[in-house]
Image (tube, helix red, strand yellow):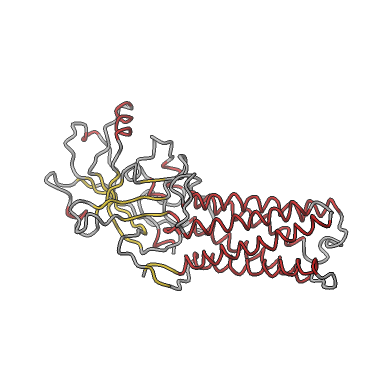
Amino acid sequence: MADSSETRASTARSASAHPSSSSRSTSPHRKPADNNGPNPGVSARHPRFSTHPHTVTRPLPFVHPTHAELIPDQTAADPSSTAHWSSRASRKNRYAPRSVHVNHQQGEADVDEEHRAGESPSFKDEFIQVEQRLRHPGTKLKVHLTWDVSFWVAIMFTLGSISWVINGYFLFLPLLNEASDNTTAAAWCAFAGGTLFELGAYLMYVESLNTGHEQLFGPALWGLVGRRGMDEKADLDAGVKEDGKRAKFRWIGIGSWRELGFTASFIQWCAASIFWISTLTGLPNIIPNLATSPPTAIADVFYWTPQVIGGTCFVIASILLMLEEQRTWWRLALGSLGWHVGFWNLIGAVGFTLCGALGYASLVSTKYQSVLATFWGSWAFLIGSLAQLWETLWREG
């Protein structure tokens, strides 16, 4: 999964008539082209695209781009066939990987800033070869059962949500019929749901760690390093080798904190880990008389507090995943399936947080609302998980 989605950098530059072009340093992977036209080796096999600051969007100014429109070269067979890149779709492997040459066109503000810094303006004919998952006008999605990390992320969260829904029924029914006592069954269902969420969140973190987006944010493509405070070395250390070779698949590590997908996945993993503590301490005989009259301090610290902290982290992660699908922070992406995954997870996270927060109180009415929050929160998580499973199954052939 990771090897097919990671970026392979190899660039080729055409000669420039700018008088200071000879003093501009080049990377070992850039090859000068013939003065009479573009290097045939650059465009013969792979399509050429261009981006512009107006076609590269991010919901927040300090994060990596999450969407980009790639405008085809005028010499292309169909100059109107704009390709689209999405960080989430790429991470979920929804589209087949393609090798393309991309040229980042600078805006006037970028050129003026380079002049003020005493640097030569970037070449407008500089292309970088990347292998990324792009959506083209002719892209068709079909149901594909692919046994990769993205598939197992959706499966784990779906099974975990089902366990939480069953747990909600077991907790809610005794409030309607006092004769029924499903405390033990509810505790084990919660433990199963928490464990499955933990596995799903970890795989989600692994998925984001191996997306191979890092070199997309290099200076040749996005024009971000230096001018916008990006640290190129940090991004290279985050998973792409400096010589352009494939980075080794990682099960643990740190990615780029400027990538919303990785940051959200890491927070989600932390949330699931903290929340899992409450499912462990909620098992029978771990905390004495937890369902009736437990020791207040122990129950508050080891049972209710992990739910509040974990649920709050779930809320933060869900908001970040929604922002990843939005072009701006204030414009909702109602037409995006990935956005709805984050939205329903947000509702579920709010429910789980309220369950823990209301659990501190000893009033009967408050206990009722706490159990009810678990019930509707579980259903919201299930809706989000099923949407994520649907998103994962529909891929380009």
Instruction: Point out the image quarter for the N terminus.
Output: bottom left
Picture quarter containing residue 303? bottom right
Picture quarter containing residue 162? bottom right
Q: Residue at left 51%, top 46%?
A: 257
Image side of residue 20 versus residue 377, left or right: left
Instruction: Point out the image quarter for the C terminus.
Output: bottom left
Horizontal and vertical percent position of residue 388: 51, 64
Q: How many marks?
A: 0
Horizontal and vertical percent position of residue 66: 43, 50
Q: Residue at left 68%, top 54%?
A: 274
Horizontal and vertical percent position of residue 179: 85, 73
Image side of residue 295 versus residue 73, left or right: right
Q: Nearer the viewer, residue 137 or 157?
A: 137
Q: Nearer the viewer, residue 341 or 240?
A: 341
Image side of residue 117 versus residue 318, left or right: left
In the rendered image, the vertical position of residue 199 relative to residue 12, given as above or below: below
Image side of residue 69 versus residue 303, left or right: left
Q: Residue at left 41%, top 63%?
A: 94
Horizontal and vertical percent position of residue 159: 61, 70
